[in-house]
Amino acid sequence: MYYLVDKIYLERACFVKSVSCPNDHKRLKFKRVQEKTRKDVERAFRALKKRWHALKYPAPYMEAKKMSEVMYTCIILHNMILEDERNAICEYNENEIVPLIQAFEVGSAEYMSRREIVYDVEMHHVLRRDLTKHIWNVDHIDLNAEPVDDLEGQFSDEDVL
């Protein structure tokens, strides 16, 4: 699993940052696809935060597992509302099993092993290179599309899902 992030994040194995200065068509295509996808995710999350106060102002004392459960609950409720309005993003599957986050004691061998994997900068570059190759081979992505700007805070109420 990995997360699409912008330039402020460190190079970690779980983060995929955009290429800051693409010097060929392959990297340019990757940059545009990554930015468009990240923008869509941010738009969806902003819509959820508008509807659910718990996501906009999470309790600082809440454990990661509990925050994950709150997030899943808000997404399910949001989709149920949309489904009720006949505008569902996806169908609800009551048999779907949502994986629980497994916690490890800080300092344990398992914790240190996983931390080492996440902090592997080389893995970050390998993942980005592999995704760049994959995206380059996808035919339906238009390279001539307008570049995506960082539109933080630029969405109106009409953009709410």
Image (tube, rainbow, N blue to C red):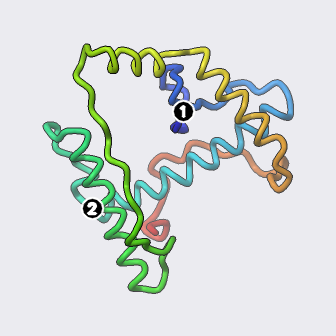
Up-down relation of residue 82 to residue 8 (above or below): below
- Residue type for callout 1: Asp
Q: Which residue position is annotated with label 2? A: 52
Whole-percent x, y for residue 19 in the image: 68, 27
Q: Which residue position is annotated with label 1? A: 6
Up-down relation of residue 87 to residue 22 (above or below): below
Whole-percent x, y for residue 44 in the image: 46, 58
Q: Which residue is drawn at 42% across and 68% down?
A: 157
Give the CA distance from mark 1 to mark 2.
25 Å
Snapshot quadrant of residue 107: top left
Tell me: 62 left or right of 94: left
Which of 45/98 is in front? Answer: 98
**Neighbours of disc 1 within 10 Å: few (<14), some (14-19), many (20+):** some
| Tag 1 secondary structure | loop
Whole-percent x, y for residue 17 in the image: 59, 30
| Tag 2 secondary structure | loop
